[in-house]
Image: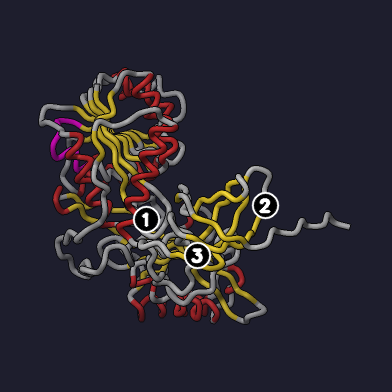
Amino acid sequence: MGKKRKALPEPVEALIEDLTHDGRGLTHVGGKAVFVHGALPGERVRLRYTRVQRRYDEGVVDAVLTPSPQRVTPRCASFGVCGGCSLQHMDSEAQIQAKQAILQDVLRRIGKVEPMRWLEPLTAGEPVQPEAEPGSQPVSLQDQHWGYRRKARLGVRWVAKKGRVLVGFRERGSAFIADTERCEVLHPSVGTRLSDLAQLIEGLDIRERLPQIEVAQGDGPVVLVFRVLDPPSDADIARLQAFGTDNGFHVYLQEGGVDTVRPLPGQAIDLYYSLPRHQVRIGFDPTDFTQVNLELNRRMVDQALALLDVQPDEQVLDLFCGLGNFTLPIARQARLVVGVEGDEGLVRRARANAERNAIHNVDFHSADLYGDLEPASWRRQRFDKVLLDPPRSGAREVLDLIADSGASRLVYVSCYPSTLARDADYLVNGLGFRLLAAGAMDMFPHTAHLESMALFER
């Protein structure tokens, strides 16, 4: 016989004390921490236990007895089940203020640092209209907290018991696909069409061998990359082509790794997004990393350049540069910019972007920034300023290199506050930099995901 599962405690009433970094409410019952999905600070709730651990318990709101003034009605009917969002029940302004507070706590607790000033939290605000292009869609003046996601990976699953296909994000804490007809945070061109996509796939011969759709959109039309485990039949290809043509999508297939991504006949398109204030257009492939929130990205680039304060005679180093999202705008102001990126494909496209934008004072290199950089030619150059935009694992491996480069100013763009705090500790307490400013950025409204920016100087 298997081990008998321990019975969960009965529901209890509790006062929610705080909001955790993953968007759950924190309370204590009998001196033990309980993390509660769907609860907000200051609320009295009845919580139902879902998991008991040795050091902490987990639960979900069974009833809100005293609601917070920050509580709002979630827009999405699947909120609480779908794992795509965790904060739709919280006012948008309160969300970003909570993220700012989490950043403050992490920098103080893990980094043992305090900036000289806190930047106002960065939100999308009113959209910046790109230059009109044939076939492009104008940026809507909609509430920028909704319909902002232009990049996403949607799960697909044929459910035999239901006799239909599900398309969307996964359920919270589960591998199952949430049963939803629309998504409120995806750009409406896709978010309102989940049912149409599901019906399309139900009619395909390979419906059981199609696990994922990658969504990619810049300023213009949408590319849908259908990941297939078996080659589609001619009839399936015809159905996919017709769906794309009839609905304004450009359909691609991916039968293996990213090198197998290809458009269906007549479906190819050049994807790009613009940074109008810097007169830059960034081209990208459908599976390339780009920021999901176009408007916030534009404001993020603006803020980074304002903090970096590049002068015409300066040399700047951009590490983890990707497609040139920061590199090319910086090059409009600097004498020379060196961009370094680990993905050779992104480096090739960054060089192509520089050519398309007639920017010639840039030099892109491919290098593993977590490996041995001693042989790299750019390693021996001197730089006045550095921009750093690492992945979640942070940038500890390149901080000594930055210190040795002679740079006096560093702008650090972070997608994970704990590694930013760890790196800030070393920059300030180990390398002698000062933390001049820091602030949160709301790249992913209605989720607990926290992006931030920090300015260091010496």
Q: Amino acid at mark 1?
A: Phe
**Whether residue 165 is situated above or below residue 283 in the rendered picture:** below
In the visual, does 31 lie left or right of 95? right
- State the residue in front, 346 or 77: 77
Could you tell me if residue 368 is visible in this image? Answer: no
Sequence-first disc among 3 and 1: 3
- Label 3 with label 1: CB-CB less than 8 Å: no
Q: How far across and down, in percent of the image, does residue 305 sit?
A: 19, 40
Q: Amino acid at mark 3?
A: Phe
**Dot 3: what SS?**
loop
* Magenta-span inclusion, residue 266: no
Q: How far across and down, in percent of the image, does residue 283 sit?
A: 28, 53
Residue positioned 25% across, 34% down in the render: 437
**Whether residue 458 is situated above or below residue 203 in the rendered picture:** above
Sequence-first disc among 1 and 2: 2
Could you tell me if residue 125 is visible in this image? Answer: yes
Q: Disc 3 versus disc 1: distance between alpha carbons?
A: 15 Å
Closer mark to the observer between disc 3 and disc 1: 1
Residue range highlighted in magenta: 328-336
Residue positioned 43% across, 65% down in the render: 67
**Whether residue 240 is situated above or below residue 282 in the rendered picture:** below
Q: Residues within 10 Å of mark 3 (few under 14, many from 20)?
A: many
* Residue projecting furthest to the right: 1
Tell me the residue that label 3 is attached to: 169
Q: Disc 1 versus disc 2: distance between alpha carbons?
A: 30 Å
Where does the N terminus fall, quadrant-wise? bottom right
Q: Which mark is residue 52?
A: 2
Q: Amino acid at mark 2?
A: Val
Tell me the residue that label 1 is attached to: 444
